[in-house]
Image (spheres, grey):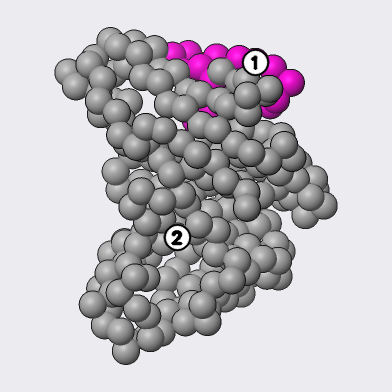
Amino acid sequence: ETGVTQTPRHLVMGMTNKKSLKCEQHLGHNAMYWYKQSAKKPLELMFVYNFKEQTENNSVPSRFSPECPNSSHLFLHLHTLQPEDSALYLCASSQRTGPYHEKLFFGSGTQLSVL
Amino acid sequence: QQQVKQSPQSLIVQKGGISIINCAYENTAFDYFPWYQQFPGKGPALLIAIRPDVSEKKEGRFTISFNKSAKQFSLHIMDSQPGDSATYFCAASTRDRGGSRLTFGEGTQLTVNP
């Protein structure tokens, strides 16, 4: 496989469920990201991991819990979500080499519906 | 608050026509301006990007025009094709020691009719 792979592609969950989103990158990158994409809104950066260390958390509610066990894998654990959390969740990766502009490589996303 | 304003929200163009999407920003610390293209069911992918020291960048049918004094930039798609139908996001980027930070616009859904 190549690129950034996300599973599952679609997820429907109740407000009391616990589920996890998985992301794997096959590009040898050292940084991984979670973005939230809602209709007619800008992509919202949620979390950034650089060399497995979380370097950014954009005031994301604690019902979203990221995990990065290594530079190739990223998880987003979900619990007690709200209907307004329904969105497309995108994973991305890049190669960070210092104060330079990197190119982001996105996965196809997980379409999440919270009932 | 760092923001990038994008317009229009949606755009319908006939095959062979010119598609134009506009973006404006406020933060003068932005120093890199990429455009991402997203097809249905796919994640965004980098299409073309420009630095503020040039006023125009062209790659095939895609051109970015950049007006630093007005803090505006736009994407022009010449000879638009049905295969160009997608959502386009402009973005603006700043840098720090750890890397870059992207701020995205709201997106434009482009439909090119045959």
Determine if the magenta segment contains residue B61: yes
Identify the residue under disc 1: B55
Query: Which residues, given as a range, are shown in magenta?
Result: B44-64
From this view, report whether residue A55 is shown above or below residue B91: below
**Can you see residue A4?**
no
Q: Position of residue B20 (x, y in %)?
A: 40, 21
Identify the residue under disc 2: A36
Taking B61 as reference, is A55 left or right?
right
**Dot 1: few (<14), some (14–19), or many (≥20) neighbours within 10 Å?**
few
Q: Position of residue A48 (x, y in %)?
A: 63, 63
| Separation of marks 2 and 1 at Cα, in angstroms | 32 Å
| Residue drawn where x is 44% and y is 18% of the image | B76
- Residue type, label 2: Lys
Residue sitting nearer the eye, A115 or A26: A115
Residue sitting nearer the eye, A86 or B83: A86
Check if mark 2's residue and mark 1's residue have beta carbons within 8 Å. Answer: no
